[in-house]
Image: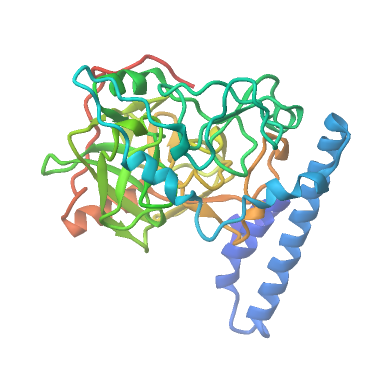
Amino acid sequence: MPNLVKLRRVLPVTVIGMGLLLGAPQASAAETDPVTEFNGQVTSVVGQIQSDIDRAFDGALRAGTGIGAAETAQRLNEAAIGSGLGQIIPDNVIEAAAAAAPVTATGTPASPATAAYADPIQPAGTVATTGEVVDTFDASRRGPNYHWRSDVLSQLMAGRPGPVLNRVTGSWFDGPDIPDESFAAQREGKSLFGPGTPVFIGPKTLCTLGVAGYDAEGRAVGITAGHCGKPGEMVISADSWPVGPAGKVVASSRNYDYSVIEFNDRAALTRSYNGVTVNSVGGSPVNGETLCKQGVATGHTCGTSWISEKRVNFSQVCAMRGDSGAPLMAGDRLVGVVSGGVIPDHNLSCRTPLQGPFFMPTASPTIDAITDNLDARGAEGAGFVLPPEGGPFAVARSH
């Protein structure tokens, strides 16, 4: 309880909501109608957070574009989803990836037809109705959930000048581009999987891979969020989707919110991907320590670890839908896997750098809890170890 009192004094208004959520179960039996009182507190905090975010959005938008938050409400409201931080995508995106043209003998994937996309890339110079200027389709660098925008509003909301890459609907962040190492693997007919690789799972979901490696039986496996996929659902890299399905979900836990992916021979594994390297797994973060994550929606973001328990960590690391499963890092040490926000309202998630710290804190199951549960089950993923350093597709780069 002293920790919660301290948090309420020093954290922004969004973290007060987290404190209420965590502190509520500890209310004494002598309190009158604690459930009603707690619900009223949460409702009040959520309303205040929404008001603060609305004012921040409105001021920034009017300063940069002359329009306010109301004019962008439709796109912002697209960020509301059901549970967790998985991106819900149209069926035909996955169908396009699953039916990808086979890799040729030289390892070069055949060019897919743009008509298969939910939001096809248009010819050069075409201006879409949203104001985005799109360029010529290039099969080696384009695909589902990959859209460049250069309109003024997109640049303002991304907090940077120049073209902005949006990979998740509702996100204003400049998303992570496909790394060179992924292209190198794709030329060999492989999909490269490592910390932060975006993955299509099943018929409708885009999430982020937390880590890839091997289990005690030598199986190539990966770990992502549990709500991202069910056992039996296929897995495709969103960075090298023309390669096709490279694995499937083989185990999932609701209690710990993790899924285990078993990869097939189309997959290559790495401990370094797109500037993120995992050199060790496990250990509890220190309260007040800076943690970082790499997700397909909001990219590489860092924030403070508020509370770390045996099974879950609460931090002010920016995340939104699509970031589910992303690696939560303390330096080059994997300490958790992003799950979702502590307040059940996705309008309070982190969708633009302009929010600063004004977004709900992020809950992440600890990697120790996940691996302990895997070892206790003794099935796929038990005895997890990282892949060897380096590898044929390794690229020296870091954030």
Q: Position of residue 91 (x, y in %)?
A: 43, 51
Q: Of residues 39 and 262, which is closer to you in this image?
A: 262
Q: Height in image: 158 above or below 78? A: above
Name the residue furthest top: 396
Q: What colouring style does the render use?
A: rainbow
Residue at position x 52%, y 44% in the image: 287
Q: Which residue occupies 60% across, 64% down?
A: 21
Q: What x and y, as percent, mark residue 126?
A: 64, 25
Residue sitting nearer the eye, 334 or 324: 324
What is the total number of numbered labels drawn onto the structure image? Answer: 0
Q: Is residue 337 visible?
A: no
Q: Quadrant of residue 231?
A: bottom left
The quarter of the image holding the N terminus is bottom right
Residue 371 seen in this snapshot: yes
In the displayed structure, does residue 391 sit left or right of residue 355?
A: left
- Relative to residue 146, is residue 182 depicted above or below? above
**Residue at the (64%, 42%) spot, across then down:** 351
Residue 237: image location, x then y, percent: 35, 36
Residue placed most toward the observer, 224 or 360: 224
Q: Is residue 362 left or right of residue 285?
A: right
Q: Going by the image, does 178 lie left or right of 219?
A: right
x, y percentage for residue 120?
A: 52, 35
Left/right placement of residue 296 relative to residue 253 reads right
Most extreme residue toward the left, as rendered? 217
Indicate the quadrant where residue 357 lies. Answer: top right
